[in-house]
Image (cartoon, rainbow, N blue to C red):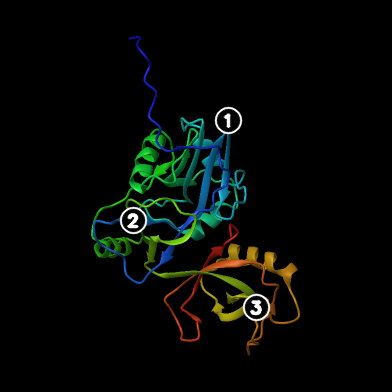
Amino acid sequence: MAFQRRKAAAIGVKAPFPGFVEPALATSIEKVPSGDRWIHEIKFDGYRVQLHIHNDDIKIFTRRGNDWTRRFSKVAADAYLINAGSAIVDGEVVVPSADGTTDFSVLQNELRGKSTRLVMIAFDLLYFNGQDLRKLPLTDRKAHLKKLIEKTAIQFSESFEVDGKEMFAHACKVGLEGVVSKVRDSRYLSGRGRDWVKKTCAQRETLTIAGFALDGNEWDGIYVGRRKGDDLIYAGKVDHGFDKTSAAELRKRLTPLIRKTQPYTKRIGHKGIWVEPELNAEIEYRAKSAEGKVRHPFYKGLREDL
């Protein structure tokens, strides 16, 4: 019998390149799960991205599908070393510090110029060389991903098979943002679901900027709101977390949006300079009141990827 060359085994389902894929999103929880069903990863403080390699071209998309290849040109350059004809990699762009932590406000500062400190941390592989991998178990997808990027500057998000409570306690102790826990054999499902869950050490939320305040001509913070359907509900005033640069930049962005009336559905008794509710801010806080107002809030930066 004539010898026949053995074909490489397919690792997924043969399929055309799908283009941008709506990302899988983690659901916030009160308690980190434990047990053999779960693996745990570090929650990073950056921009969620989707890296595309297709037809000798590299693109980087935000969570909403906006093309930010130019803004993340350093990461795109790193991706040229990936040995793949086509691939879709899910991950986060961050600026790592010396102690291994990440900070969204530092990332914001880096994006004002052409940063060489941006790093992509990859945690999932959706598509590879004509094969759709989304129906494979998560642990299999991560194993293929680790091999794919091992000789590049793109970092791999390790998963830990440990007690969830202990993982979370350690993450908070060393200053990390939190933990993302995932069902180990789960498929990749677009949208928010329960196979991926997250718990942050401090509470974080993306809130809409409704206005800003000045003390004389000095910056005195922003008023924020939480969207509920078509309504914008007052969520508090944020006056910490700004430096001179971020305050000046935010004031410049908000000034063209100034309007005469409050954008809140229910008027509040504060005096402010009100704006069209078009910009979103990442806010960190310790707790919320019964009415939903943030307590001890800090401004972390604009969320332009949403």
Image quadrant assignment for residue 246? bottom right
Determine whether the residue tagged by mark 3 lies in a helix, strand or loop.
Answer: strand
Q: What is the spatial separation of the Cα atoms under label 2 and label 3, in whole angstroms?
A: 48 Å
Tell how many labels. Answer: 3
Q: Earlier in the sequence, mark 1 or mark 2?
A: 1
Is disc 2 surrounded by few (<14), some (14 to 19) or many (20+) residues within 10 Å?
Answer: some
Image position, residue 130 (x, y; %) = 50, 34
Residue 183's tag is: 2
Q: Is residue 150 above or below residue 301?
A: above
Q: Residue 225 location in percent, x, y?
A: 59, 77
Front tag of 1 and 2: 2
Mark sitting on residue 294: none
The extreme top residue here reads 2
Kindly indicate the quadrant of the structure image that contains residue 276.
bottom right
The residue under label 1 is 56
Camera-near label (2 vs 3) is: 2
Relative to residue 7, is residue 245 drawn left or right?
right
Report x, y in % for residue 106: 50, 57
Q: Distance from label 1 to label 3 (Cα)? A: 50 Å
Residue beneath disc 3: 214
As drawn, which residue projects farthest toward the front? 1
Q: Residues within 10 Å of mark 3 (few under 14, many from 20)?
A: some
Q: Is residue 256 visible?
A: yes
Quadrant of the rendering where the C terminus is positioned: bottom right
Residue at the (32%, 52%) spot, across then down:
184
Mark 1 vs mark 2, CA separation in Å = 34 Å
Q: Nearer the viewer, mark 1 or mark 3?
A: 1
Helix, strand or loop at label 2? It is: strand
Residue 177 seen from this side = no
In the rendered image, which quarter contains the N terminus? top left
